[in-house]
């Protein structure tokens, strides 16, 4: 894996950002895009564009085939059994809303419990919260331990007879903790509990193997996986997608429409109402190919080195406090600096081209628990280098200087 | 691509004057098929007698020349066959439309095979394959009589 | 308005489609895209990419501003009062689902009636149908007259004390009928009825003036307006968007998140959960600018000429039967040919590069009413010419020849 | 852009040692403010006496140097002013942050104005404007005492 060649595939690194080289450490928010993806979007629109699945002229047929090819690529990439287990959505957030809404319609009863964790992103909490009101569902929170991990015992002890769903992140976007999904699924399934995984950070950083994880649903955010914005993937086991009701209604998802009744189409159409994000789906095939060309094992190895290096230098920097110390950490280094608020850190780093995120990162519950209103987060992509982390550290030192620390 | 191959004489003729159109009397098996994309639908009726022979077969529905011709030719060829023979013909036909260059079964006579092969023109028109196969899938469903409505998405 | 120059802005017309020039008559399905839109997508991704609204580094701030600029452009283009009345969705279908779902939660009671029309696209029927089951709502259908129009009397006579919502298309995607939305809104509002307009075909073909129409909601499909796929706009009057509950939950749409309660953000965030279609929104600004640079009045005039010419030649062609004869027809010519099924027409036309759509165009109710299983539809965009319609007519003649008519 | 202008001595000092932090006794008006994007929050307490004079004012909350300094300076300057004077100062400050090069009011003394002008560095940092204005918007809400929670989105 040659990092210089990889960086060359991302046009943005040719740009100067306020006269600085870009040190992009905000990939957990959204990753940059390789040229192959951009070219595919452009080519599709300028040479092959048509809507998919509706018309039968040449362009429409070709576009439909390309669209379905991506479904197959995703199926293979995440090792799903059937291509119809892949549903395209507008993002991971929609995917999680789809699951919460349809499980809510079909299998949840008042007083049933949904178990989530203190690590969850708002996108894996608010959709379940809706069911509190509409269905009188209870939500329980598995607690983090002092390392910012969720050990399986903390899950186990919150499970009751009423627990119907465990909705859990694969990789925390704040502590970077990688959760033992496979073990959680085994435990959950032994009790008949449905497992929904928020795979937003798992997508870019981990090997995705649905047969191994055996979860019932897995939500992916394509724009964090070197793909276009406005696209997500919901993986759902066929038995669920067949059994659950549709989520949105409209063109393309129907079978027969009469004035007094409507029957719905089969998978995958059932969950893809209306014109989909055609160009984005077609271009996402290139993101998968890009990931495959490097190899997820190489990516994991590269990022692990960076994480270790980052931890090392930040730990040496007194007044920096790393958030979490999970057994297995992926992609993310969150921290606070004694005496400097995260927003001030972000602004000062930005001045030298170092882009990080400051705030609660859509994890207010976790920040409440940690007793801090906000944190600073440096998050990694395949294109980052140790040099980027050195610049991060220099920036932090600059903060300390400005704040007289 | 070649429109002439798609719209051969025999297709146009069967499309215009489909055989076995209507609801056969005393049918004991039936199934509906539907193409949600374009609104085509077909209803296949079957009379399977005690010897498991297709005593009568017919269809109702509307669709393009290809789908009407396909249903017409299908019902013509299946009539009088045993259910096992019918299944073999169906499988052979679907295999031919999907990938095989030729029909392989030994049940149909050569000129019947020629008729069926006239439908092979759709291979070059992927979006039209469903038109040619809908009635056949529906026949399978009728024979299994599992009551499941067939859509062409599968 | 110079049609040749306009065509030059669309790269797809430089392509050969199976050795033919492309005669694209499927714009009601999805329009082709001008180069400015494609360049904007490419530029944004390759030079300026970041997620919006979350981080405070330079790229994030710049992207957020660009994103919000489009909101303002759309506001102006459709003459909305407030930029926060513009919500970005994944498409018009999602926009209509959002409205049906949130009205269903907030104001609809069992036995209330929704009035739609026989012209409606499935996307403006299925979302309301969901409320039949979940809320025991009734759906009534205003009938078309023999011209394929919905005269206001046909609306008026279906209104009862129970009618709470009229959901109606601005321009039929099959008959091309332009409906008198302004008058319908006046009538509806005099009875306290909410008006939801499916503006999918209104968007590209009509002048959009929310103050004039005065409807409560208007749904737009950006990919039919020379914009990217995967994007729609919901216009909603502020009083509604403020009053109604959120639709999807997730990052970005919250105010405060606690373990036992959640409060939601203000407009426009409330309805934009999760990472949005950032690049698509930013590029859609160019679609608006493209439309403005030509001028909607010029577009209307050009398309009217084409429609008249098309009607003229098709009427002369015996065995062609035009569908509908509305007082005002926009953008669409649907027809049948005696003795040739629409799919066969589409396939035969395609052989010479003429792309039309065949089927029920997601309007099964209408086709049932017309007593036909399917129709052929030629639909127009700003780039079409009389020559395109001549080729359509030649293609139809070719069908007749092949079918021996 | 210039970090030195943003983080002037006086900002850093107020940020580190905010004045009037805490919950003033006997307050009769208060309001909460919140920036949902980053989690900053502030709670402003106000004692308005019978002559509609701000007898006491304080705030609780957490935030960045800019937001703490802004709340600190604000409470310092508003204390002792009549409600009309307070409103004029608020308007003037918000106008300055938004677009005006200078403060215009005649209520504040020159060195108080200088203190406020130290916050003008945020103008070059659009995402930080909210940090500087949150406590001010919250003060408006407290004075109107309409109980509405302020978010920075408006
Ligand atoms: C009248 C009408 N309504 C709704 C839709 C659905 O729009 P979209 O597929 O962009 O969600 C369409 C387009 O197919 C349409 O023509
Ligand atoms: C862990 C996690 N879950 C959910 C989301 C939401 O994903 P999206 O914004 O792509 O819908 C994110 C990204 O912000 C995330 O990091």
Image: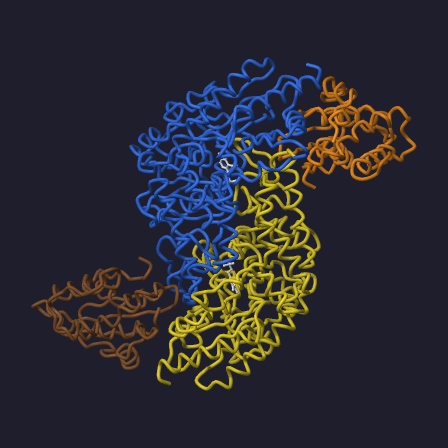
Chain colours: A yellow, B orange, C blue, D brown
Side of A136 where A288 appears, left or right? right
Quarter placement of the C terminus of chain C = top right
Res A92 → quadrant: bottom right
Q: Is residue C74 above or below residue C295?
A: below
Q: How many marks?
A: 0
The x and y percentages for residue A295 are: 68, 65
Residue A156 visible in the picture: no
Relative to the observer, which residue lies in front, C92 or A230? A230
Q: Position of residue D86 (x, y in %)?
A: 15, 66
Residue C23 sits in quarter: top right
| Location of residue A257 by image quarter | top right
State left or right for residue A52 relative to residue C275.
Answer: right
Q: Is residue A195 above or below residue C233?
A: below
Q: Nearer the viewer, residue A322 or A24?
A: A24
Q: Position of residue C293 (x, y in %)?
A: 40, 38
Image vertical order of residue C191 relative to residue A42, above or below: above
Does the image show residue B77? yes
């Amino acid at each position: 894996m040659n990092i210089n060649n990889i960086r060359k595939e991302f046009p943005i690194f040719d740009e100067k950002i306020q006269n600085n080289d870009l040190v992009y450490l905000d990939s957990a928010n959204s990753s940059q895009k390789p040229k192959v993806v951009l070219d595919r979007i452009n080519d599709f629109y300028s040479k092959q564009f048509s809507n998919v699945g509706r018309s039968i002229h040449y362009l429409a047929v070709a576009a439909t085939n390309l669209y379905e090819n991506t479904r197959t690529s995703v199926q293979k990439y995440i090792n799903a059994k059937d291509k119809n287990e892949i549903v395209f959505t507008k993002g991971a957030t929609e995917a999680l809303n789809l699951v919460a809404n349809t499980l809510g319609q079909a299998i949840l009863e008042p007083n049933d419990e949904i178990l989530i964790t203190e690590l969850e992103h708002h996108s894996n909490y608010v959709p379940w919260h809706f069911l509190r009101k509409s269905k009188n569902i209870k939500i329980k929170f598995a607690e983090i331990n002092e390392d910012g991990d969720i050990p399986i015992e903390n899950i186990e002890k919150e499970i009751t007879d009423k627990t119907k769903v465990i909705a859990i992140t694969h990789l925390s976007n704040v502590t970077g903790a990688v959760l033992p999904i496979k073990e959680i699924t085994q435990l959950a399934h032994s009790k008949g509990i449905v497992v929904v995984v928020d795979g937003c950070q798992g997508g870019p950083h981990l090997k995705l193997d649905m047969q191994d994880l055996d979860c019932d649903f897995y939500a992916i955010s394509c724009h964090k996986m070197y793909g276009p914005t406005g696209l997500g993937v919901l993986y759902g086991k066929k038995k669920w997608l067949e059994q659950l009701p549709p989520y949105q209604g409209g063109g393309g998802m129907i079978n027969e429409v009469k004035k007094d009744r409507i029957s719905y189409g089969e998978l995958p159409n059932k969950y893809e109402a209306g014109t989909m994000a055609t160009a984005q789906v077609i271009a996402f095939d290139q993101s998968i190919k890009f990931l495959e060309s490097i190899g997820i094992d190489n990516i994991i190895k590269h990022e692990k080195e960076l994480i270790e290096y980052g931890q090392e230098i930040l730990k040496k920097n007194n007044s920096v406090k790393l958030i979490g110390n999970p057994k297995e950490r992926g992609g993310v280094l969150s921290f606070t600096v004694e005496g400097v608020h995260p927003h001030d850190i972000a602004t000062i780093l930005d001045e030298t081209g170092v882009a990080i995120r400051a705030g609660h990162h859509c994890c207010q519950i976790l920040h409440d628990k940690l007793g801090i209103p906000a944190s600073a987060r440096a998050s990694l992509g395949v294109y980052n280098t140790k040099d980027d982390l050195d610049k991060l550290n220099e920036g932090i030192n600059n903060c300390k200087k400005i704040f007289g620390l | 691509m070649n429109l002439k191959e798609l719209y051969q004489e025999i297709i146009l003729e069967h499309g215009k004057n489909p055989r076995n159109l209507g609801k056969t009397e005393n049918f004991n098996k039936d199934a509906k098929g539907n193409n949600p994309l374009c609104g085509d639908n077909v209803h296949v009726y079957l009379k399977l007698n005690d010897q498991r022979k297709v005593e009568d077969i017919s269809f109702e529905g509307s669709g393009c020349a290809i789908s009407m011709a396909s249903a017409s030719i299908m019902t013509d060829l299946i009539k009088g066959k045993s259910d096992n023979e019918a299944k073999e013909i169906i499988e052979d036909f679907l295999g031919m439309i999907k990938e095989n260059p030729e029909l392989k079964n030994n049940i149909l006579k050569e000129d019947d095979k020629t008729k069926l092969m006239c439908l092979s023109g759709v291979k070059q028109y992927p979006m039209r394959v469903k038109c040619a196969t809908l009635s056949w899938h529906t026949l399978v469903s009728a024979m299994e009589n599992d009551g499941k409505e067939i859509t062409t998405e599968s």
